Amino acid sequence: MVGSRSRTRLALLAAGVAVLAATGVVAASGAASADSVVNVHYAVTGTTYLAKLNTTANLGSGALASTVDLTTGTSQSTLTLPSTAVSVKEFGFVPVTATTELIQNGPAAGTVNFSTNTITSTANVTLKIFGVSLPVGDKCQTTPFNIGISSGPGFTVSGGGPVTGTYTIPAFHDCGLNTLLLNLTIPGAGNTLNLDLGPLQLG
């Protein structure tokens, strides 16, 4: 059974690996025993603001699953979110509906500051678009890019709370004749990710 101090360390480490996203590497090196590895998870909801489209998309309900090594403080984490529907007007007048998906490219990595009870993290992801009212095929996506996040005001380790970050969307490719249109209207800086983590759960 994990004691209260270990639970606090575990919670901090797990929170530090949020996502997409995402999530954690901390502490000193050292050999880990099998019983020092613990699985934790958070329920997650969130939104993302797409700057060039001036629209906010609801990311729905998902989960953040982490494997945490209490000996070394290292953690690997995966953020799972459902596909997201987005309705916008390209160039301000062409109505477009699309389904988007953030695909995490391997476990995310971050840091936890035990003194300040704060977390930071970076996840590598790919943004995929499909089901668009304009034909883009089934391979339309960006090149991989990073999203950096950190805990916000009101966040607590055991109770969860806000985790936010900013990111830059790179160019799309393999979107057929509409590749140029998408690249004129979506990629760019100033996009934000806002996640809300539920209470920490073991297992």
Image (spheres, rainbow, N blue to C red):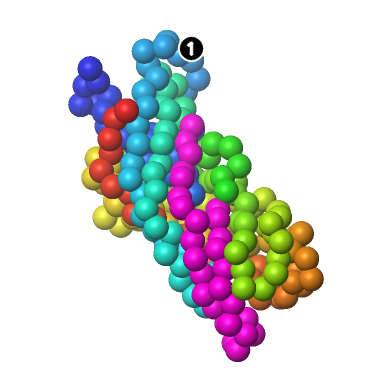
> Which residue ends up furthest to the left in the rendered image?
4
Q: Residue 72: image x %, image y %?
A: 44, 21
Residue 116 seen in the current view: no
23 and 198: which is toward the camera? 198
> Which residue ends up furthest to the bottom in the rendered image?
93
24 and 128: which is toward the camera? 128
Residue neighbourhood size for the residue with mark 1, other residues' Cα within 10 Å, grouped as few (<14), some (14–19), many (≥20): few
Q: Residue 174: image x %, image y %?
A: 76, 59
Q: State the residue at coordinates (62%, 57%).
A: 128
Instruction: Determine whether 102 is above or below 190 in the image.
Output: above
**Secondary structure mostly seen in the magenta stretch:** strand
Q: State the residue at coordinates (48%, 12%).
A: 31
Instruction: Determine whether 109 is above or below 151 in the image.
Output: above
59 and 167: which is toward the camera? 59
Q: Is residue 170 magenta?
A: no
Range shown magenta: 76-102
Residue 139 seen in the current view: yes
Locate the C terminus and report the quarter of the image it occupies: top left
Q: Amino acid at mark 1?
A: Ala
Locate the N terminus and report the quarter of the image it occupies: top left
Is 1 left, or right, of 26 in this rendering? left
Q: Number of marks in the image?
A: 1
The residue tagged 1 is 31
Residue 90 quadrant: bottom right
Q: State the residue at coordinates (62%, 85%).
A: 94
Q: Residue 65: image x %, image y %?
A: 41, 36
Q: Is residue 86 magenta?
A: yes
Q: State the residue at coordinates (59%, 87%).
A: 92
Callout 1: SS? loop
Q: Residue 85: image x %, image y %?
A: 49, 66
